[in-house]
């Protein structure tokens, strides 16, 4: 009888998933006392248990999200490329097993190797169709985030990869992990809405994510259940500074803190939106849990409290052995006037980040607060010092 109930529930989930909605997975005792309610917008506050496919599941955000979702009772199909190890943000190796034909059970992770740069992710049509029948929601988190990568790679992974994910599971509800900086060079208030096409971009990463977002928006226009999540510059855990790997902006921070450059161009009113990873992961988990209320919306997973660039430099300068560069007006900065070694560092590792030192976007954060009540904790000087302290404790930044 219990097996019959489970089969009936699985059929209901598949049916609802085709409509972009999933009923809560109820245990035998709960279902015997609480009749199943039809899907409706009123279920936005009900925590749903779903079978979630995550692309880029071995990445920093992907693994942390897989960890959060299985702890919440969801089943996770982890789509990985070359590296199949799922490491949580605190360094724990997540328990998982290779996909063997069955859907992930609640609280379980199964892994599948695939390549989003290939049509059908490199899978045959039969396998892709079978996986589709085992998925209630796709979270497309795979991306090439290296700012200095050639445009052809950004196009292959971030743009074509998104098109391939959409085409591989054409009816699956999808949550796209974008970036808040698809706003490009725009300053001031940034709404949780399609980007303003009048503005350009600071690097190929931003441009490619905006192009991918356009594919997502076009798919949503066909009636497909879709939502977009836009993190800003992701740092470590708010309480401890913990982060699994020191990527992207951390590498630039080290160059600045260690005095590898004597001067950089920066607008005095520029500001960077740093966001702790726990807020990003909690926000994505909220969107999954309240999927019915998230469909059709864009969510800024940002602090909403951008750090002024001069305050950012001051936080570095407070560390006795740090030697941050002088920030000078862009109009007076001449990269060719830097000493030869600094000129090479600037060209190879820093220049592509300079857009962050020349604009001050303020990202609206209303949609997540409305959906789940979650708000980002303060990203103030104390939080930045926790991030710096953790990086020093791990040996990424030099200690005095």
Image (spheres, grey):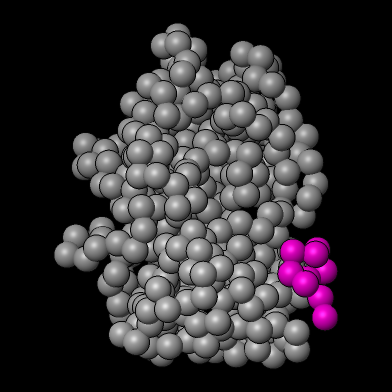
Seen from the viewer's position, the closer of residues 148 and 259 is 259
As drawn, 212 above or below 237: above
230 sits to left or right of 50: left
Q: Please provide percent x and percent y for residue 38.
A: 43, 38
Q: Please provide percent x and percent y for residue 60.
A: 62, 49
The residue at 33%/26% (across/down) is 167
Q: Please provide percent x and percent y for residue 144.
A: 47, 44
The residue at 57%/29% (across/down) is 81
42 sits to left or right of 71: left
Q: Is residue 16 visible?
A: no
As drawn, 215 above or below 78: below
In which quadrant of the rendered image does the N terminus lie? top right
In which quadrant of the rendered image does the C terminus lie? bottom right
Quarter location, residue 159: top left
The residue at 27%/41% (across/down) is 215
Q: Which residues are magenta?
A: 392-400
**Which secondary structure class fits the magenta region best?**
loop
Seen from the viewer's position, the closer of residues 264 and 108 is 264
Residue lying farthest to the front in this orientation? 340
Numbered label tally: 0
Q: Is residue 205 visible?
A: yes
Seen from the viewer's position, the closer of residues 74 and 343 is 343
As drawn, 126 above or below 267: above
Q: Please provide percent x and percent y for residue 355.
A: 38, 70
The residue at 28%/47% (across/down) is 211
139 part of magenta stretch: no
């Amino acid at each position: 009888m219990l097996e019959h109930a489970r089969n009936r529930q699985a059929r209901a989930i598949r049916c609802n998933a085709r409509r972009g909605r999933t009923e809560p997975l109820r245990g035998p005792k709960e279902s015997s006392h609480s009749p199943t309610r039809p899907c409706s917008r009123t279920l936005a506050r009900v925590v749903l248990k779903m079978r979630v496919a995550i692309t880029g599941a071995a990445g920093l955000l992907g693994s942390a999200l897989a960890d959060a979702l299985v702890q919440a009772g969801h089943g996770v199909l982890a789509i990985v490329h070359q590296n199949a190890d799922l490491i949580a943000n605190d360094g724990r190796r997540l328990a998982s097993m290779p996909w063997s034909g069955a859907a992930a059970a609640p609280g379980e992770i199964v892994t599948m190797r695939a390549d989003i740069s290939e049509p059908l992710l490199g899978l045959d049509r039969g396998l892709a169709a079978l996986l589709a029948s085992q998925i209630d929601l796709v979270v497309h988190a795979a991306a090439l985030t290296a700012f200095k990568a050639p445009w052809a790679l950004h196009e292959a992974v971030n743009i074509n990869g998104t098109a391939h994910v959409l085409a591989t599971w054409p009816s699956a509800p999808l949550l796209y992990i974008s970036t808040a900086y698809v706003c490009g060079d725009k300053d001031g208030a940034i709404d949780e809405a399609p980007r303003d096409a009048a503005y350009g971009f600071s690097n190929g990463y931003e441009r490619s994510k905006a192009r991918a977002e356009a594919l997502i928006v076009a798919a949503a226009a066909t009636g497909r259940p879709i939502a977009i999540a836009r993190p800003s510059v992701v740092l470590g855990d708010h309480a401890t500074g913990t982060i699994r790997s020191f990527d992207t902006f951390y590498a630039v921070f080290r160059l600045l803190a260690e005095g590898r450059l004597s001067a950089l161009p920066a607008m005095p009113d520029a500001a960077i939106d740093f966001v702790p990873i726990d807020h990003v992961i909690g926000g994505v988990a909220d969107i999954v849990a309240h999927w019915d209320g998230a469909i059709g919306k864009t969510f800024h997973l940002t602090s909403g409290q951008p750090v002024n660039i001069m305050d950012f430099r001051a936080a570095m300068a407070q560390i006795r052995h740090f030697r941050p560069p002088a920030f000078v007006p862009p109009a007076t900065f001449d990269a060719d006037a830097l000493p030869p070694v600094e000129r090479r560092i600037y060209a190879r590792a820093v220049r592509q980040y300079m857009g962050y030192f020349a604009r001050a976007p303020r990202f609206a954060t209303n949609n997540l607060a409305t959906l789940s009540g979650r708000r980002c904790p303060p990203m103030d000087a104390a939080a930045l010092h926790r991030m710096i302290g953790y990086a020093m404790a791990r040996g990424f930044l030099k200690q005095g």
